[in-house]
Amino acid sequence: MRAFLVGVLMLSGLLVSVPTASAAGVTEVTGFGSNPGALQMFEYKPDGMTAGRPMVVVLHGCTQDKAYATNAGWIELADKWKFGVVIAQQPSANNVQSCFNWFQSGDITRGQGEASSIAQMVARGLSDTGASSSRVYVTGLSAGGAMTSVMLATYPELFAGGGIVAGLPYGCATSMIDAYSCMMPGKNKTPAQWGDAVRAASGGYAGPWPTVSIWQGSADYTVATMNLTELADQWTNVHGVASTPSATDTVGGYPHAVYNDASGRTVVQTYSITGMGHGQPVDPGTGNGQCGHATAYVLDVNVCAAWQLGLTWQLNQ
């Protein structure tokens, strides 16, 4: 089983595409740049979207594809709030399980491989949708969560914020073998060590840094729950704030912590979904706060991560 998990490397299981009228508008974009990582780009611009709106870059997990954006709730929220969506898809030719190669140095370095391809998608998406370059966000599940960490570290100037779901800190692994220990049991480093990894990857970037929201199931036996803590340590250090929460409360009944800077702005927050295994939190339905479609590794836990991220990023404004 462990050999299979390393082959899957962040594993999020097979997704079933949920047919919706909106999903039909997800279109492939070719010729978006030199594309050194040989990724596929898909794009969604909802009817009625005006210039200057936000854009969200969505990164799927292993064995998944562009349908993840629909199942997680991003396409329906784009229709509701009128923002653009860019979806990066990993062909099986690059990775047999269609995982983003978050553990390969040639794909997680600024100006190289898959990281560079996704950065090129951002530029093309901004041109195609007319979205604001100051309102670009990135999020993903599992391998996509780990790749979200990569993008926030290597291209921080492109993103106002990121949402990491069942992911890992940047710099945790630089090879497939190393990925074993990152996933389970996880690696314990000091906040400064984690922060230094981001600063070294950023090409000399001096800020302002993207805000980061971190989501983790407390019963995730694929990606160790300690990665929530290590991710919080990494990004509080990057932002230069204390690694202890400024405040704690609950969201949907689940523990939530915020870390604020000197001005009182929340720069890092964590969500620990009690009893949830490895997957993306959703709350299917049409009510306020609801979104997503439950399927394998997209889990109905009565809170939709996409909705909460959307509010944090003010996508509804």
Image (spheres, grey):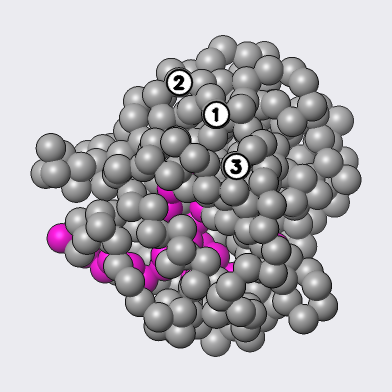
Q: Residue at x 55, y 44 (%)?
A: 58
Residue beneath disc 3: 254
Q: Residue at x 74, y 18 (%)?
A: 286
Residue beneath disc 1: 301
Badge 3: few (under 14), some or many (20 or more) residues near its Cα, within 10 Å? some
Regarding residue 237, the answer to whether it shows in the image is yes
Q: Horizontal placement of 118 versus 113: left or right?
A: right
- From the viewer's perspective, is the residue at label 1 or at label 3 nearer? 3
Q: Residue at x 35, y 62 (%)?
A: 107
Measured Cα–Cα span from mark 1 to mark 3: 10 Å
Kind of residue at disc 3: Tyr
Q: Residue at x 33, y 71 (%)?
A: 188
**In the rendered view of the protein, which quadrant contains the N terminus?**
top left
Kind of residue at disc 1: Val
Where residue 186 sits in the image (x, y, percent)?
Answer: 29, 61
Which segment did they paint magenta?
148-177
Kind of residue at disc 2: Thr
Question: Is 183 colored magenta in this rendering?
Answer: no
Regarding residue 106, the answer to whether it shows in the image is no
Label total for image: 3
Where residue 15 sits in the image (x, y, percent)?
Answer: 41, 24
Q: Disc 1 or 2, which lies upstream in sequence?
A: 2
Q: Disc 3 or 2, which lies upstream in sequence?
A: 3
Residue beneath disc 2: 295
Badge 1: few (under 14), some or many (20 or more) residues near its Cα, within 10 Å? some
